[in-house]
Each structure stands twice: as structure tokens, then as C-alpha cells.
Amino acid sequence: MKKESDDMGKVWADIEVINAGEEYAAANGALAKYKVRRINVNALVDTGATILVLPEKDIIALGLQLRRTTRSRFAEGKSKECKIYGPVTVRFCKRTMQTEAMQGPANIPPLLGQIPMEGLDVLVDPKNQRLVLNMESGDPEMALVEVYTQLFEPEI
């Protein structure tokens, strides 16, 4: 049974992941926009991970293509060959960025690593255990999104 203390110090973020290849095809009229596959996931923000990691079920749901394989080293020091899929668009609030996704084990949640976090220009707020927009990015529209969510977000 999962205890509340299991999430102490962990930061989670609701993100949308979109099949970017299909997104491009829809933008060029080669695919109907409603056919673009997308999923919403609650991802563990992992500052120790480099890229986006998705379980196989999410990769299948998005219809992603295998791009390459690579050797990856994990926190416990082991390394293994991993499959990289893509391209994907990652969306948090109104910010988007394109990247690839590594297939992770079925028993772990999606992980949001440093590369997509940098591309989205977001920061970890460990005190409040959340992902926030970088307000110093100079993008007024993005700053308004953060102010809006702070004003209308229900108190927990």
C-alpha cells in the first residue's frame, strides 16, 4: 500500500504528450487534426533523468516510431540498451517543446527529465512540490498563465 510519506520530496506534473509526426502531418493537411494521438500523464519530475521516459503502454498509445537504441546508465550504476522513440511534443501549461522519449519499465511512471524541462523553461519548486514556469523568461504570455493559475488554483 502506498503511503503519503512515499511522495515526500517528489514533484509531479500533469503534462500532455503528442505524437509530433502526426502533429506535423495534420498541420500540412495530410492527416485530420482529430486523428493526432495525444495522452495526458502525471509525470514524476526527475532532475536526475536526462530525457522524457514513457512506459511502453504510452508509447503504443501514441503510435511512436522507434528512432534508435542507446546504452543508458541508471542511478544504481547499471547500464542497459534502451529504445528511443519519437518525435513527441511535450506540453506544460501553454509551453511546448519537441523531443524524443525513452521506453521505460512498465513498473515506473512517466518521468520528465532535464532536456524537456529546459525546453519548456520550467523550474522545480521543491518547497511546494510542483513544477512552475520560469517567470524570468521574458515571455509575457507565459507569465500571465502562471499568475492566472496562482489566482484561481484552489487552496489545498
Image (cartoon, rainbow, N blue to C red):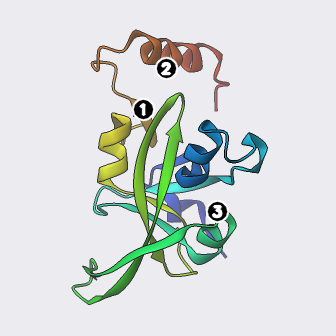
User: Where does residue 18 sit, x and y in percent of width and height?
Assistant: 59, 50
Callout 2: few (<14), some (14-19), or many (20+) C-alpha neighbours within 10 Å? some
Q: Which element type, helix, strand or loop, lies under badge 3?
A: helix
User: Where does residue 130 sit, x and y in percent of width and height?
Assistant: 46, 40
- Residue identifier under label 2: 146
Q: CA distance from mark 2 to mark 1?
A: 8 Å
Question: In this view of the protein, which residue sits in the foreground, 101 or 4?
Answer: 101
State if disc 1 and disc 2 touch (CB < 8 Å).
Answer: yes
State if disc 2 and disc 3 touch (CB < 8 Å).
Answer: no
Q: Left or right: 66 with respect to 47?
A: right
Q: Please state which amino acid type lies under the numbered disc 2.
A: Glu
Question: In this view of the protein, which residue sits in the foreground, 148 or 90?
Answer: 90
Callout 1: few (<14), some (14-19), or many (20+) C-alpha neighbours within 10 Å? some
Q: Please state which amino acid type lies under the numbered disc 1.
A: Val
Q: Tell me, for residue 104, which label it has, or none.
A: none
Question: In this view of the protein, which residue sits in the foreground, 143 or 21?
Answer: 21
Task: Name above or below for residue 147 compared with residue 59.
Answer: above
Q: Tell me, for residue 132, which label it has, or none.
A: 1
Q: Which element type, helix, strand or loop, lies under badge 1?
A: strand
Q: Please state which amino acid type lies under the numbered disc 3.
A: Leu
User: Where does residue 83 sit, x and y in percent of width and height?
Assistant: 41, 79
Residue at left offset 54%, top offset 54%:
21
Residue 74: quadrant of the picture:
bottom left
User: Where does residue 101 sit, x and y in percent of width and height?
Assistant: 44, 64
Say which quadrant the N terminus sits in: bottom right
Q: CA distance from mark 3 to mark 2?
A: 28 Å
Residue 124 visible (yes or no): no
Q: Tell me, for residue 62, which label it has, or none.
A: 3
Residue at left offset 40%, top offset 9%:
140
Residue at left offset 51%, top offset 65%:
6
Q: Earlier in the sequence, mark 1 or mark 3?
A: 3
Residue at left offset 47%, top offset 62%:
86
